């Protein structure tokens, strides 16, 4: 008998007989009832508590803030997609800037070392955020592959304020999740960190040292009280 | 800043065995460095856990966590088949292993089929349990740990001393020394500098690795998704950069629905390290698609039984399989805090290790572990999925002396004829009141004859002596007095 069949047989022929599955009440992980302002305040509080940086911007000129961030951090080579509106708008805004734009729509095998060693920052869109934990959720695509939010030392993520959900549970309950998981779905809550050396927190151990979240507000940045 | 090299030497590399628990505990208790390192770390972790649940109705959340795990176990064979079908539909190849050796062979053969010479590993306790690194190295395949703590422990030729924080037994000076000795890193007390050095060393290895091996925190049957929880990003690197990703996990890690994951994740991070969330929650549902530009070309899932299906047979022992490997039970264990993780000599130390290891290794080797507890109950109180760990410790103590159901390998190994006869005699005495009373009153009369030295017990304490009058006699006297007083009071009444 194969290992598979033997294991399943033992589990099915359980000595103490079949088990009764208990009911699960998920009320404790949903229905927070937060207002958009509370959601934003919580998101910002939690993500900044783990060294995430939050910058509030007006949706119509978010790229001005992007240019400022790139300048302030001395980014010379920025990896970004092409088709997503975030990437397309960034490309247009940076056409005259002194930042080299690195295309990511090529197989990693062709530029692994380049991405690991010669890219200063990666720019990605996000699908939304989670107020309760200060998390971003991303579904990497061919246009914005997995590694640009991981390998470069700085990750710049663009989040629309009105896409914040209260809890992780609320996110996975959205239509389209359980029914159509992508190859890779991610929650990102801050820059990479470790406390493996005597409980001392250090950032940027394998992934980005810095995470900058540009929070876009349709009505302008001041709406957030920023 | 540099430190004196002679003052701090990393602990000598040493093989630990659960058979030597008592000797190892004795050694650890006599090592002030070990005791200080663990005391400091555990105190911090207990406080952080407590604070992190501040906003929550923890009891309701624990109840939900326990029920999700119980539901998954109640449907385990069906969920494993569903997981397999959905993973395969997503392009993840699923393999089954009866034990650790078979799982090691499966992984080695997968590596060999890709001519892999170097494997980069994300943290996986199951791979520790089956000694995967040693197995691969025998086949000439180098396996390198990439979680910083695991990396340091591997450099120091040790095993993890904690399931979440593998290098918790080492302090900054010791780690500086290890990195200097093994990688030529300049000695420093600056944690950022050491972390940056490790980042540099491991980035080369991520790029060069032929295969990435990771564990799994939750495997979602409904979607065929493997969930990984981490802070460092090494897990994402391991599962994204090399062309092949092999995930290995115990068969109990499956959950039914995607919606089961958020409550367990909320419990896991807070219980483990007091974090409200980890940096990354990585959900993998397949290999790279033709139109995608990164991610592994192949993803494999190895499901390991290794004694789990035998734990599954017994209604009481089954609770052991609810565990989500947060480590809160060890963080709160007064025994673990004092003797440290290596003393147990097992992959899983602390209370969860003491109830799990006997099944994985047999009671012959692990008979002392269920007694490595004061039964104070802290482990059961903090367990995020409400495993009644103290009850299970007692059950395994019973099994070890042949008084249980015999459902644990090596049951009865601790039974001695002398002890069994002694308890039998005690039982007879305790159920024959006349003899019992005569015996205890005799003991009181002969109390002067009891020895004043009783081995280690009397090193720091005075020897116990039977009381001159038994409790039974005292109660009788007391009752007689009260009766007299009542009678006198009644007579006085007009």
Image (cartoon, coloured by chain):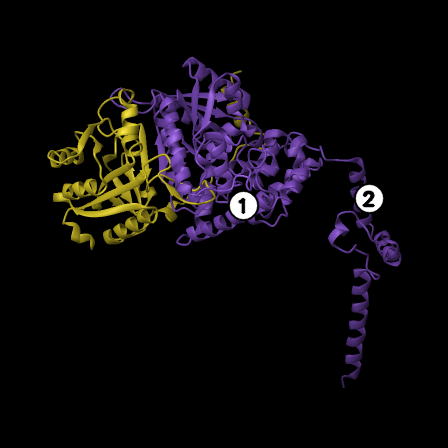
State the count of labels. 2
Counting from the top left corner in percent of width and height, residue B128 is at 52, 29
Quadrant into which the N terminus of chain B falls:
top left
Q: Nearer the viewer, mark 2 or mark 1?
A: 1
Q: Earlier in the sequence, mark 2 or mark 1?
A: 1
For label 2, count other residues whose C-alpha is less than 10 Å away and answer few (under 14), some (14-19) or many (20+).
Answer: few
Q: Residue furthest bottom?
A: B494
Instruction: Tell me the shade of chain B.
Output: purple
Give coordinates of residue B129: x percent, y percent. Answer: 54, 29
Q: Which residue is mark 2?
A: B425
Q: Secondary structure at mark 2?
A: helix
Residue at screen point 55% across, 21% down:
B101
Q: Colour of chain A?
A: yellow
Provide residue B211's location: percent of width, then percent of height.
40, 21
Residue position marked by numbered label 1 in the rendering:
B37
Q: Of residues A107 and B321, which is closer to you in this image?
A: A107
Is there any visible trace of residue B357 in the rendered image?
A: yes
The Cα–Cα distance between marks 2 and 1, rounded to whole angstroms, is: 46 Å
Viewed as shown, does residue A85 lie left or right of B276? left
Disc 1: CA contacts within 10 A as few (<14), some (14-19) or many (>=20) = some
Is residue B225 at least partly visible in the picture? no
The image shows residue A38, relative to residue A164, as above or below, that is below
- Image quadrant of residue A195? top left
The foreground one among A111 and B256 is A111
Helix, strand or loop for disc 1: helix
| Quadrant in the rendering for residue B424 | top right
State the residue at coordinates (48%, 39%): B165
Q: Position of residue B274 (x, y in %)?
A: 44, 47
The image quadrant where one finds the C terminus of chain B is: bottom right
């Amino acid at each position: 008998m194969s290992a598979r069949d033997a294991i399943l047989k033992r589990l099915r022929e359980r000595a103490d007989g079949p088990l009764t599955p208990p009911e699960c009440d998920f009320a404790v992980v949903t229905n927070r009832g937060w207002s958009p302002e509370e959601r934003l305040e919580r998101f910002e509080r939690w993500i900044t508590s783990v060294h995430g940086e939050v910058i509030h911007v007006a949706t119509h000129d978010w790229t001005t803030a992007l240019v400022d961030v790139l300048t302030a951090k001395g980014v010379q080579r920025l990896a970004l997609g092409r088709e997503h509106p975030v990437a397309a708008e960034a490309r247009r805004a940076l056409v005259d800037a002194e930042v080299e734009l690195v295309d990511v729509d090529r197989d990693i095998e062709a530029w692994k070392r380049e991405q690991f060693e010669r890219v200063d920052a990666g720019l990605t869109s996000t699908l939304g955020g989670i107020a309760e934990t200060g998390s971003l959720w991303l579904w990497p695509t061919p246009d914005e592959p997995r590694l640009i939010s991981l390998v470069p030392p700085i990750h710049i993520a663009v989040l629309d304020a009105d896409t914040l959900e209260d809890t992780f549970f609320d996110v996975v309950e959205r239509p389209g999740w359980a029914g159509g998981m992508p190859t890779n779905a991610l929650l990102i809550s801050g820059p990479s960190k470790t406390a493996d050396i005597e409980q001392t927190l250090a950032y940027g151990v394998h992934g980005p040292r810095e995470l900058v979240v540009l929070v876009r507000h349709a009505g302008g940045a001041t709406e957030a009280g920023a | 800043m540099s430190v004196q090299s002679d003052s701090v030497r990393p602990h000598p590399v040493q093989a630990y065995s659960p058979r030597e628990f008592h000797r190892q505990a004795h050694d650890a208790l006599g090592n002030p460095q070990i005791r200080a390192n663990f005391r400091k770390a555990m105190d911090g972790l207990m406080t952080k856990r407590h604070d992190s649940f501040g906003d929550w109705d923890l009891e309701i959340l624990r109840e939900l966590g326990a029920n999700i795990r119980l539901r998954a176990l109640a449907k385990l064979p069906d969920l494993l088949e569903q997981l397999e079908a959905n993973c395969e539909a997503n392009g993840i190849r699923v393999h089954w292993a009866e034990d650790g050796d078979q799982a090691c062979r499966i992984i080695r053969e997968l590596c060999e089929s890709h001519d892999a010479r170097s494997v980069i590993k994300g943290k996986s306790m199951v791979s520790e349990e089956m000694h995967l690194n040693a197995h691969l190295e025998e086949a000439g395949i180098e396996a390198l740990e990439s979680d910083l703590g695991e990396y340091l422990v591997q450099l120091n030729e040790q095993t993890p001393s904690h399931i979440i924080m593998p290098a918790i037994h080492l302090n900054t000076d010791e780690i500086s020394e290890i990195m200097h000795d093994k990688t030529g890193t300049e000695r420093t007390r600056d944690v950022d500098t050491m972390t940056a050095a490790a980042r540099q060393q491991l980035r080369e290895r991520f790029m060069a690795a032929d295969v990435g091996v990771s564990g799994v925190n939750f495997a979602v049957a409904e979607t065929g998704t493997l969930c990984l929880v981490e802070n460092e990003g090494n897990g994402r690197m391991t599962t994204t950069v090399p062309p092949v990703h092999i995930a290995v996990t115990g068969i109990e890690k499956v959950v039914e629905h995607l919606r089961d994951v958020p409550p367990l994740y909320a419990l896991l991070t807070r219980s483990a390290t007091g974090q409200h969330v980890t940096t990354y929650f990585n959900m993998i549902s397949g290999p790279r698609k033709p139109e995608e530009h990164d991610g592994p070309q192949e993803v494999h899932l190895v499901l390991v039984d290794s004694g789990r299906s035998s734990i599954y047979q017994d209604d009481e022992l089954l609770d052991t399989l609810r565990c989500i490997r947060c480590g809160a039970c060890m963080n709160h264990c007064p025994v673990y805090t004092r003797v440290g993780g290596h003393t147990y000599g097992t992959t899983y130390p602390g209370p969860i290790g003491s109830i799990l290891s006997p099944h994985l290794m047999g009671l012959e080797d692990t008979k002392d572990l269920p007694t490595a507890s004061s039964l104070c109950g802290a482990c059961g109180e903090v367990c995020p999925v409400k495993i009644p760990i103290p009850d299970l410790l007692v059950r395994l103590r019973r099994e070890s002396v042949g008084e249980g159901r015999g459902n644990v390998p090596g049951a009865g190994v601790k039974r001695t004829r002398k002890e069994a006869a002694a308890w039998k005699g005690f039982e007879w005495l305790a159920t024959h009141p006349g003899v019992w009373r005569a015996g205890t009153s005799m003991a009181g009369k002969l109390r002067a004859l009891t020895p004043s030295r009783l081995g280690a017990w009397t090193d720091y304490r005075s020897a116990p002596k039977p009381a001159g009058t038994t409790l039974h006699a005292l109660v009788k006297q007391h009752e007689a007095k009260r009766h007299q007083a009542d009678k006198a009071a009644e007579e006085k009444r007009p």
